Each structure stands twice: as C-alpha cells, then as structure tokens.
Image (tube, rainbow, N blue to C red):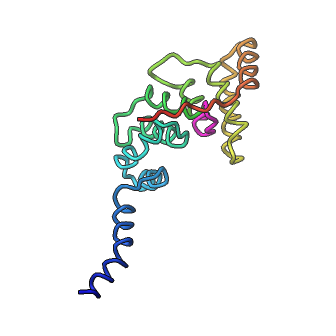
Amino acid sequence: MRRLAAVLVLIAPLLSFQLFASGCAKTPEDAKRAYKNGDYKTAYKVLKPFAEKGDPDSQFLLGEIYKRGHGVPQDDAMAMNWYRRAAWQGQPNAQNNLGILYFRSQAMKPDYVQAHVWLNIAASNLPVAKERETAVKNRDLIAAFMTPSQIAEAEKSAREWKPKMEQKRER
C-alpha cells in the first residue's frame, strides 16, 4: 500500500500537467497550428479571447478567418474590424491587408487615401523584402486613382502614424 501511495505521489504532478496541457492550456501558437492544419473552428475558439484582450497577432489571424470565411461566414466588415485593431498596434500583415480591403472591399466604396496610408505603413514595417515590394507596388497602383492632394494627404498621414496599444479588456 505504501508503494502505491509513493507511486501516486510521484506521478500525480505528471498526470495533472498532462491534463492541463491537453485540455485547457491553449495559446495563440496552438491556434496558429490549428489554422495551418485547417482546423479553423479550433483556431477561432482559441484566438477570440486573446484577440478581445488586445493581442495583435490574434486579431490579425481572426481578420484572416473572416476575410477567407474559414470556419465562419465570410465577412469583410468583421475582417476589417480585426485587421484595423491589429494594424493600429503595429501588426504589419494586418496593415497590408487593411490597405487592400480599403481599396477592394465590395461591402463599401473604396477609400483610396486610407488604402494608400495603410499600404505605405505596411511597406515600412513588413519584415520580408518580397512582401514590402508587393505593398509598395499596390500602394503605387492605388496612387493612379488619386489626385495629387489625396496622395499628399495619405503620405502625411503615413509619416505621422504612430502605433496605439489597445486597452486590454478584462472579462
């Protein structure tokens, strides 16, 4: 009996850790893996609380989920909401996608100035050269639809832009 008690004392922490790790300890990294594996419902479920608390990478990925309709109905307005929240905190992929949505979103009239602003900011912040080049090309294509005063306004806004950390909301 003592031997059984000793074994239980030794393995109890391991069992509780395994239960914790397998069930309730979900992180944004877990959600990214689920997303990459096509398990969009799990990705959404795990990301949403982190996004609501202000995590910009989680907000960006929720924007992707809504933009592509992965596990949820496709919704450009919701995608824009999550991209905007992440973009304002400095998430460069969200900045890029927000600029594209301002240019192409079917649910609203294109806003060339905002598209130019966000693509300009993204081009300054994207870490991969090819992504930066694409943002610059898209920004320059949008400029063809703009007046010189709109371009000047967009460039000024992009120069003056500063990230704003979102207030973390506690539940």
- Where residue 120 sits in the image (x, y, percent)? 70, 30
State left or right for residue 37 relative to residue 158: left
Give 16 or 34, whichever is nearer the viewer.
16
Please state the extent of the stretch shown in magenta in the rendering: 88-96
170 up-or-down from 9: above or below: above
State left or right for residue 99 relative to residue 121: left
- Residue for point 66% across, 24% down: 116
State left or right for residue 112 relative to residue 109: right
Residue 165 counted in the magenta span: no
Q: Quadrant of the C terminus?
A: top left
- Where residue 119 sits in the image (x, y, percent)? 66, 31
Give 62 or 140, whichever is nearer the viewer.
62
Q: Main secondary structure of the magenta part?
A: helix
Query: Toward which corner of the image does residue 23 lie, by quadrant?
Result: bottom left
- Where residue 96 sits in the image (x, y, percent)? 61, 35
Query: Toward which corner of the image does residue 75 lie, by quadrant?
Result: top left
